[in-house]
Image: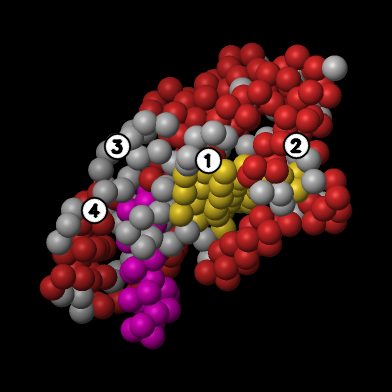
C-alpha cells in the first residue's frame, strides 16, 4: 500500500469520515457506539467530525466493534498515525494568537489541497492580492486590530501565495464580479498596481480568473463569497462560506454538491479568462487616464 501524504488535520477528517461510515453501515447511532466502547457520545461525534484526535484505545475498540481487518485496518491505522503527529504548521507557530478556529482550518486544508475554487463578490481573492491591497482590506475589515496584528494577518496572506509557484503549485480557479475591479482599495495608485499584478499572475498556467461583468446583472449579486478545496487520492472536497463572523465550514455531501454546482453556474456566467484579462486592462487604462 502506498504511503499516504497528508497533514494531520486532513488525516483526522478522513479517519473520522471512514469511522462514521462504518458506524452507519453497522446500523448504530453515536450514542450506541459510545456505550459499546465505554466512551461518550460527544467524543465519538467529535472524532467522526475530525474535531478531535482519536486515542489509540478508542481506535482499537472502534475497529473491534466494526470488525475491521486486513487492508482496511492498515489504512485506518496509517490515518491514525498521521493524525496523531505533533506537527505544528508554520502559521500556527508564528501567528497562532491571530487565528480563529475556522481560519486555522482553512490554512490547514489549503496546505494539502491540489485545487482551490474561489468566488468573491466584492473583493479580490486573497491569493491574488498585492501587499498594499491586503493591508487596506485587513485594516478596514478588522478595525479593532492593532498594527502588529494587521501586519501578522497580511504576512500570512503573502505566505499563502507561495503555494501558487514552485513544486506542486496550487491550482487556483477564481470567479469574481466586475465590482471587485472598480473599488479603489488603498487608493487609485494602489489599485493600479493591483490590476497590473492581476495581469501578471494570471499568465501562470495554474491560475484562472474569470469576471462576471456588469452586464451579468443578477448573476453576480445573489451569493456570498465562498471557496472549495479539492484534494488528491479521492479525498472529499471541503468548502468554506465567508461571512462577517468568519469562515463557516461546509463538509456535508449535500452542501458540497450545492456549492460546487453554484460555482459551475457562476463560472458559466463569467467572461472567459482572455476576455477577463481584456476587461482588467481596460479598467487599468481608465485609472491611468
Of the two numbered discs 3 and 1 on the same chain, state the one appearing first in sequence. 3
Q: Nearer the viewer, mark 3 or mark 4?
A: 4
* Highlighted magenta segment, given as a residue range: 8-31
Closer to us: mark 1 or mark 2?
A: 2
Say which residue label 1 marks: 207
92 or 162, nearer to the observer: 162
Where is residue 63, by image quadrant? Answer: bottom left
Residue 31 drawn above or below residue 199: below
Residue 101 is left or right of residue 262, and the answer is: left
Foreground mark, 4 or 2, reads 2
- Sooner in the amino-acid sequence: mark 1 or mark 2: 1
Mark 1 in CB contact with mark 2 (< 8 angstroms): no
Q: Mark 4 highlights which residue? A: 4
* Discs 3, 1 touching: Cβ within 8 Å: no
- Residue pointed to by mark 2: 279
From the viewer's perspective, is 239 left or right of 168? Answer: right
Q: Earlier in the sequence, mark 4 or mark 1?
A: 4
In the image, residue 157 above or below residue 265: above
Question: Does the image show residue 22?
Answer: yes
Q: Position of residue 266 (x, y in %)?
A: 70, 57
Q: Which residue is mark 3?
A: 87
Query: Gap between marks 1 and 2, in whole Å?
Result: 17 Å
Amino acid at each position: 500500500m502506498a504511503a499516504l501524504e497528508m497533514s494531520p488535520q486532513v488525516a483526522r477528517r478522513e479517519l473520522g469520515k471512514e469511522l462514521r461510515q462504518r458506524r452507519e453501515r453497522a446500523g448504530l447511532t453515536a450514542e450506541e457506539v459510545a456505550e459499546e466502547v465505554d466512551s461518550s457520545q460527544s467524543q465519538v461525534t467529535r472524532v467522526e467530525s475530525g474535531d478531535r484526535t482519536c486515542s489509540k484505545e478508542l481506535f482499537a475498540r472502534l475497529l473491534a466493534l466494526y470488525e475491521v481487518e486486513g487492508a482496511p485496518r492498515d489504512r485506518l491505522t496509517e490515518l491514525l498515525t498521521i493524525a496523531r503527529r505533533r506537527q505544528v504548521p508554520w502559521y500556527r507557530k508564528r501567528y497562532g494568537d491571530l487565528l480563529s478556529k475556522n481560519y486555522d482550518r482553512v490554512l490547514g486544508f489549503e496546505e494539502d489541497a491540489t485545487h482551490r475554487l474561489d468566488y468573491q463578490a466584492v473583493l479580490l481573492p486573497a491569493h491574488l492580492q498585492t501587499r498594499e491591497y491586503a493591508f487596506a482590506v485587513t485594516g478596514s475589515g478588522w478595525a479593532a486590530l492593532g498594527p502588529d496584528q494587521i501586519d501578522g494577518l497580511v504576512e500570512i496572506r503573502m505566505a499563502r501565495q507561495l503555494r501558487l509557484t514552485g513544486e506542486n503549485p496550487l491550482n487556483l480557479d477564481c470567479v469574481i464580479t466586475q465590482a471587485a475591479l472598480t473599488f479603489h482599495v488603498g487608493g487609485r495608485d494602489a489599485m493600479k498596481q493591483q490590476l497590473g499584478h492581476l495581469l501578471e499572475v494570471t499568465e501562470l498556467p495554474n491560475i484562472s480568473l474569470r469576471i462576471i461583468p456588469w452586464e451579468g446583472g443578477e448573476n453576480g449579486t445573489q451569493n456570498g463569497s465562498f471557496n472549495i478545496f479539492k484534494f488528491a487520492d479521492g479525498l472529499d472536497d471541503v468548502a468554506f462560506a465567508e461571512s462577517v463572523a468568519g469562515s463557516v465550514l461546509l463538509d456535508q455531501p449535500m452542501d458540497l454538491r450545492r456549492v460546487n454546482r453554484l460555482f459551475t453556474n457562476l463560472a458559466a456566467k463569467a467572461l472567459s479568462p482572455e476576455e477577463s484579462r481584456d476587461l482588467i486592462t481596460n479598467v487599468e487604462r481608465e485609472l491611468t487616464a
